[in-house]
Image (cartoon, rainbow, N blue to C red):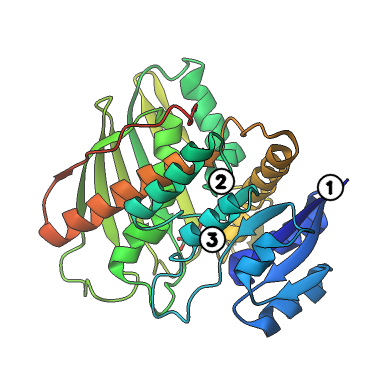
C-alpha cells in the first residue's frame, strides 16, 4: 500500500518536495498539496499529480486519507520569518498521530522546539524527522566516514562557507544566523559527534549590517575542544557555493560539489555554480525523503536523520549567535538535558 503524503506549503521547498514524492519516491503517493494560497496549492497539485489541493493545513493533517506530513510551510508574505509555522504544524501532526518530515529550522525559538520534544516524550515515540538534509549528502557522509574510521585522527577544526547568490528581500543579517547557518550548526555537530559550548559572531567592518543578507562570520567552540568557523554570505552574487573542510591530526577532508562537467572555450575553462541549494543537495533531499518513507513504514527512526532534539540544539546555538552578534561578545551555551527518547 502506498504511503499517502500531504505536503504543507507549495513555495520553493514544498514544490520541490512535491516533485521528489511524485517522481523519485517509489512507494509514496502525493495525496494533497496545501498552501495558504489555494491557487498555488492547486498549481503544484496539478503539476505533480496530487489527489487534492487545500488551503487549510490543520484539516489536511487530520484527513483520514493522509498517512504522513511533509511540512514545508509557505513563507509568510515576507513580513516575518518564513519558518515560524513549522513547530505548530509539527505539533498538529503529533496530535494527529502522524509522522512528519519538517523542513528546517523546526523553530527559531528553542522554547517552541522544546514544546515539540515534550509532545513526543509524552507519547513515548518520535514523530518528527527534521530536514537537515546535509546529513544525507554523499560528500558530508564521506567526510564523516573519514573521521569515524580513524584515518583522519582526532578532529581539531572544521571550516564552513555557505554562500547564496542573493538574499530574499526580508533576509536580515540575523536571519543568516537563524535561517541559513542552522545547516552548518547541525552538520558540524553531526560530523564531529560534538556539541557547542560557546559562539562568537563577527561582521566585516564597513558593511551596512542592516542590509539584507549582510555576511556574518562565526567561531564556535565544541565540548571536545574543537573550533568550527562558519561564513554565511547570502549575497555572494557568483553562485550557490557551500564548502567545508574537516581538519584532523593526520590530514583533512574537503567537500566536493557534484559538478558533472567543465566547459572549455574562448581560452577559458570553467565549471558552473548552481543558482541555489536545490541542485547542489538534490541527492541529499532524495535520500532524506527515502529515509522518511522508511520511517513511516517501519516506525524505525532513521539512524542518521535529524530529530526534534537536533532542532532544539540548532535553535539554541542560533539564539546564542544572535546574542553574540548584538552584544559583540563570546556567548557560552547552556542546554536542557537530552531526553532518553532521542537515541542518536
Ligand atoms: C534555505 O532556507 C536553505 O535551507 C538552504 O539549504 C540554504 O542554503 C539557504 O541559505 C537557506 O536560506
The residue at 67%/43% (across/down) is 292
Label 3 SS: helix
Query: What's the mark number on residue 89?
Result: 3
The disc label shown at residue 26, or none: 1
Report if the beta carbon of the residue with label 1 is closer than 8 angstroms to ligand 1. no
Asked if the residue at label 2 sits under 8 Å from ligand 1, the reply is no
The residue tagged with tag 1: helix, strand or loop?
loop
Tell which tag, 1 or 3, sits nearer the viewer: 3
Between the C-alphas of marks 1 and 3, the distance is: 25 Å
What residue lies at 47% left-to-right and 37% top-to-bottom? 121
Does label 1 or label 3 sit earlier along the sequence?
1
Q: Position of residue 62 (x, y in %)?
A: 67, 61
Residue 127 located left or right of residue 226: right
Q: Which residue is mark 2?
A: 128
Q: Sequence order check: which comes first, mark 2 or mark 3?
A: 3
Residue 166 as seen in the image, left or right of residue 29: left
Amino acid at each position: 500500500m502506498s504511503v499517502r503524503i500531504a505536503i504543507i506549503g507549495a513555495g520553493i521547498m514544498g514544490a520541490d518536495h512535491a516533485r521528489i514524492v511524485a517522481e523519485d519516491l517509489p512507494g509514496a503517493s502525493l495525496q494533497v498539496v496545501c498552501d495558504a494560497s489555494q491557487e498555488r496549492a492547486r498549481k503544484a497539485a496539478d503539476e505533480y499529480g496530487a489527489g487534492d489541493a487545500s488551503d487549510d493545513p490543520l484539516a489536511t493533517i487530520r484527513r483520514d486519507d493522509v498517512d504522513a506530513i511533509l511540512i514545508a510551510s509557505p513563507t509568510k508574505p515576507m513580513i516575518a520569518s518564513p519558518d515560524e509555522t513549522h513547530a505548530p504544524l509539527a505539533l498538529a501532526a503529533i496530535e494527529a498521530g502522524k509522522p512528519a518530515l519538517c523542513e528546517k529550522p523546526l523553530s527559531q525559538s528553542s522554547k517552541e522546539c522544546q514544546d515539540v520534544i515534550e509532545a513526543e516524550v509524552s507519547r513515548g515515540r518520535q514523530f518528527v524527522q527534521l530536514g537537515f538534509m546535509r546529513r544525507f549528502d554523499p560528500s558530508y557522509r564521506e567526510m564523516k566516514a573519514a573521521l569515524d574510521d580513524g584515518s583522519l585522527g582526532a578532529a581539531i577544526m572544521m571550516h564552513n562557507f555557505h554562500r547564496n547568490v542573493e538574499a530574499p528581500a526580508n533576509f536580515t543579517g540575523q536571519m543568516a544566523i537563524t535561517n541559513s547557518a542552522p545547516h552548518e550548526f547541525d552538520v558540524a555537530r553531526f560530523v564531529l559527534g560534538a556539541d557547542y559550548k560557546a559562539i562568537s559572531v563577527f561582521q566585516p567592518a564597513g558593511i551596512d549590517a542592516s542590509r539584507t543578507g549582510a555576511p556574518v562570520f562565526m567561531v564556535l567552540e565544541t565540548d571536545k575542544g574543537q573550533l568550527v568557523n562558519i561564513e554565511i554570505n547570502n549575497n555572494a552574487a557568483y553562485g550557490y557555493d557551500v564548502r567545508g573542510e574537516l581538519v584532523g591530526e593526520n590530514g583533512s577532508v574537503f567537500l566536493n560539489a557534484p559538478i558533472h562537467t567543465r566547459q572549455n572555450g574562448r581560452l577559458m575553462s570553467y565549471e558552473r555554480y548552481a543558482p541555489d541549494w536545490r541542485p547542489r543537495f538534490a541527492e541529499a533531499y532524495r535520500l532524506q525523503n527515502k529515509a522518511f518513507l522508511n520511517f513511516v513504514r517501519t516506525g524505525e527512526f532513521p539512524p542518521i536523520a535529524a530529530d526534534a532534539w537536533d532542532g532544539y540544539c540548532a535553535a539554541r546555538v542560533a539564539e546564542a549567535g544572535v546574542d553574540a552578534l548584538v552584544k559583540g561578545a563570546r556567548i557560552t551555551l547552556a542546554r536542557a538535558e537530552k531526553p532518553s527518547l532521542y537515541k542518536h
